[in-house]
Amino acid sequence: MAQTQPRRGLLLILSSPSGAGKSTLARRLMDWDPTLRFSVSATTRSPRPGEADGREYYFKTRDQFEAMVAEGEMLEHAEVFGNFYGSPKGPVEAAMKEGRDTLFDIDWQGGQQIRNSALGRDVVSVFVLPPSIAELERRLRSRAQDSDEVIAGRMAKSQAEISHWAEYDYVIVNTDIDKAFAELLTILQAERMRRDRQPGLAEFVRGLNREFEAR
């Protein structure tokens, strides 16, 4: 006896200070489950060479972006260095109805806004911590992408970000990326099986009871 209705999709939020491994975990998760939808942000900044609308970002004018915010079409948004960034609600709701999960790679402020939104009951939030501050700095330097000044700025911001760890449903300490990924998979698989995310379950159990009565 199969369930006829798909489960309701969930919103998986990943947050961490820069260098803790959040983006690597997000990429691995997308490779593990191609049905997982990655939330593409909208922005008012101009496209960079090679970027395509709807792939890296949804590129909007400032007026368009502000209209979306005013009409409640953004799950979260913020202004960063003079440009707006935000997560459009429509694609997320469509994925949820199809039983598909949406992955958000965002900071604690964006995560807080989504948890406080109308879709907050479907949020599963995970914060990724480094094993130590020394290791966090080592990882940032090993990228060989940023200047000492940029790294110092990221390290200064990390303390404020880490202070919000207790606002999340789950916390992973990324001592080893394979172990951290296994823990993330365990969280996702367990959350997908929650009773309240399986809309066909009650009817399935009623069918089992009918089988008992027919014996």
Image: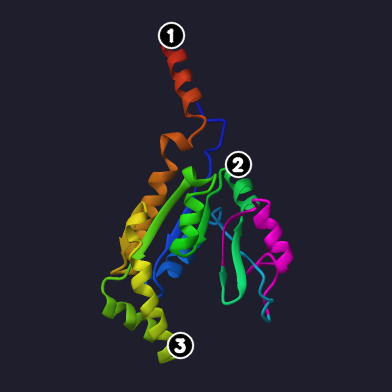
- Work out which quarter of the rendered image holds the C terminus and state it: top left
Tell me, for residue 97, which label it has, or none: 2
Q: Amino acid at mark 1?
A: Glu
Query: Which residue sits at x=44%, y=86%?
Result: 150
Q: In the rendered structure, which disc, 1 or 3, sits on the residue that comes first in sequence?
A: 3
Secondary structure of residue under mark 1? helix
Tell me: 139 left or right of 145: left
- Crowding around mark 1 (Cα neighbors within 10 Å: few <14, some 14 to 19, many 20+) is few
> Given this view, does label 2 or label 3 mark the residue nearer the observer?
3
Q: Read off the residue under disc 1.
A: 213
The residue range painted magenta reads 50-78
On the question of residue 166 being in view, the answer is: yes
Q: Residue at x 65, y 67 (%)?
A: 55
Q: Nearer the viewer, residue 180 or 118?
A: 118
Name the spot of residue 93 as percent of width and height, x first: 61, 47
Q: Residue 125: x and y, percent? A: 42, 54
Farthest bottom residue? 148
Q: How would you rate the neighbour count of disc 3 (Cα within 10 Å): few for under 14, some for 14-19, many for 20 or more?
A: few
Q: How is the image coloured?
A: rainbow
